[in-house]
Image: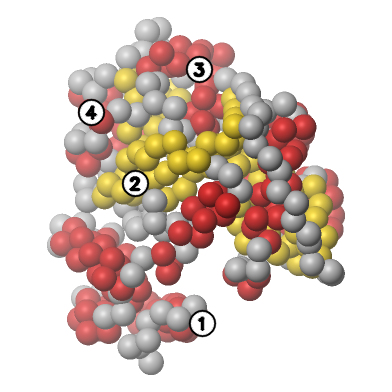
Amino acid sequence: MIYELEKQNYKKVLPLVKSDNELSVFSVIASTMDGKIYVNDKTIPTAALIQTSECNMIAGDTRDFAFNEAIAEILDFWDTITPDSEEWCGIIPQIHPDKFIKKYQRRRYLLDTDTHQNMSISIPNGYFLEQAAPDTLRKCGYQNADKLLEWIENWGSDANFATYGVGAYIRNQDTIVSWSISDCAYKDKIAIGIHTDKDYRKKGFAAIVVNEVIRLCVLKGYKNIEWLCVDCNKGSIGVAEKAGFQLHNTYDSFAPYAPVENLRDLSEHEWEIWAKYFEEGAKSEARLLQECIYTYIKANNPQKVKELLALCPNKQEMETDIKSFISYLHTIGMASKFN
C-alpha cells in the first residue's frame, strides 16, 4: 500500500534518507519548498517516495513489495528517479512504469563560502547584471523572462523565494541572455542552477552571473553552495569548476530518456548506444519507438530512422516534426547525413 503524507508529518521520513545527493529532498521535508511525499505507513514509515521540483527520490527499506508495486501508479512513464541507496538500483527497473529505464551518473559539486574568493569579472558594454525579482520579471516583457519565472515558481511563492532564494541575470536590451537561480535550500546550504540562451553561449556570461549569485548567497548567510549536473554536461562542469566549485561525489540516477542538457554533450557513437537500447525496449514497449527514432537522428543514422519510421502508425504526422527537428540539429552542427 502507498499513502500520501500530510505536510506536517514530512519530518517522519527524514531518518530514511541516507544520502546528501539531492538537497531538494531536504528542502521539501523542511517545507521550504513544495513537493509530495508518499510512504508505506503514515505512522511509522519505513519506505518513501519523495517528489521535488528537481527529482523523484526513493528511500528506506526496499523490501515492502506492496509499496514498491504501488510506485508505478504514482510515477509517470517519462519520470526520472534517483535511488537514495545502492540497494534500490536493482529494484527501480522492476517498479518503474518504464521497465527499460536506464541508469546514468550525476555530479555533485560543493563550494565553501568561507574560503571562496569572488572573482573580479567585468561585464561587456551594453549588457546589464540585475537581480531576479519575480514582480519585475512578470512586468518587463523581456525575452526568456518566462523561463526564469518557471524556476522561481518552484519555490511555491514569491515570499518563499525572497526569504530563501537568490537569482541574477544578464540582460542585453530586452533579452535575458544568461541567468542563475537557486533551485532549493536547506539550513545553511543552497543549490544553484545556470542557463545561457543558445545564441549567447561561449561568451563568458555564465561565469559572470554565477559569480554574482555566489555573492548573493553569501549575503544571505549560506555557508555551502551546491551544484548538480549530468556527468556528461561539459559546459556545466566547466562553469562550476571555473567558479571555484569542487567535485564532491558522483551518484546514480535513472531516466527513460538520455538525460542530456545539451545535445552535443554526447557523441554520435554515444547517441547510437542509447538508440540501440531504446530499439530493444521498443520491441515490448511501444512508447519507446518514437524516442528511439529521434535518438537515431541524433546518432546521424538515416537508414535506421527510415526503417523504424515505417513501423509507426502516425508516420505522416511524425515526418513533419522530424523535418523540423533535423533543421534545428543542422543549426548546431548535428545530423549531417540527413537532408
How far from the left and from the top, in percent, is residue 82?
A: 36, 37
Q: Kindly identify the residue that appears in the image at 76 percent across and 67 percent down.
A: 175
The kind of residue on which mark 1 rests is Thr
Real-space Cα distance between discs 2 and 4? 16 Å
Q: Residues within 10 Å of mark 4 (few under 14, many from 20)?
A: some
Of marks 1 and 2, the one in the foreground? 2
Tag 3, which secondary structure? Answer: helix
To which quarter of the image does residue 203 belong? bottom right
Q: Earlier in the sequence, mark 1 or mark 2?
A: 2
Q: Which residue is mark 4?
A: 87
Q: Earlier in the sequence, mark 2 or mark 4?
A: 4
Q: Earlier in the sequence, mark 3 or mark 2?
A: 3
Tag 1, which secondary structure? Answer: helix
Q: Which residue is mark 1?
A: 331
Real-space Cα distance between discs 1 and 2? 28 Å
Which quadrant holds the N terminus?
A: top left
The kind of residue on which mark 4 rests is Glu
The kind of residue on which mark 3 rests is Tyr
Real-space Cα distance between discs 3 and 4? 23 Å
How far from the left and from the top, in percent, is residue 187?
A: 62, 21
